[in-house]
Amino acid sequence: MENSIAYQATGRRKESIARVRLLPGKGTITVNGRPIDNYFARETDRIVIRQPLLVTNTVTRFDIFGNLQGGGLSGQAAALRLGIARALLLADIEFKEILRKHGFLTRDPRAKERKKYGLKGARKRFQWTKR
């Protein structure tokens, strides 16, 4: 099942990219060299990141090192979640069914829509005046 090797995976969401390394350990999560509680101020982001570990009962089995770049904090949290789920899959293929069922192996394709010419933004228009 697990050896003393690192499992590496990549997760993406919006403009964020997360490179994740899973090592057998006590369950510490380090993001860009900082503890997870220090990096992610919002509790919801921390909950999102731990979801794949909770459903597979591996919270205290692996130490996680995440390298994040680009995007905002919510996008980075979702990218890290995908990276952790993919790394867990490399660690144990039997997690595939439960991770897939909870939707942790699917990359969220939603991204910012481009601004169109003649409009204020992607969809918002300028105010119409009759005279």
Image (cartoon, rainbow, N blue to C red):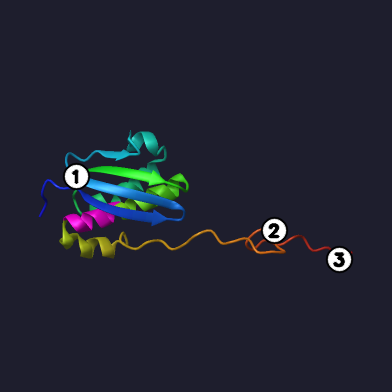
* Residue bearing the label numbered 3: 130
- As rendered, which of 38 and 14 lies closer to the eye? 14
The stretch of residues the image draws in magenta is 84-91
Task: Residue 112: give x, y in percent of width and height.
Answer: 53, 58
**Could you give the CA–CA distance between mark 1 and mark 2, rounded to whole angstroms?**
48 Å
Mark 2–mark 3 Cα distance, whole angstroms, equals 19 Å
Tell me the residue that label 1 is attached to.
23
Magenta stretch holds residue 88: yes
> Position of 65 compared to 131: left or right?
left
Q: Is the C-beta separation of discs 1 and 2 under 8 Å?
A: no
- N-terminal label among 3 and 1: 1
**Residue visible at 27% across and 55% down?**
85
Report the disc number at residue 6.
none
Residue identified by numbered label 2: 120
Q: Position of residue 63 (x, y in %)?
A: 22, 42
Amino acid type, label 1: Leu
Nearer to the camera, 97 or 19: 19
Above-or-below relation of 28 to 120: above
Q: State the predominant SS element of the stretch in magenta.
A: helix
Residue at figure coordinates x 10%, y 55% from the top left: 1
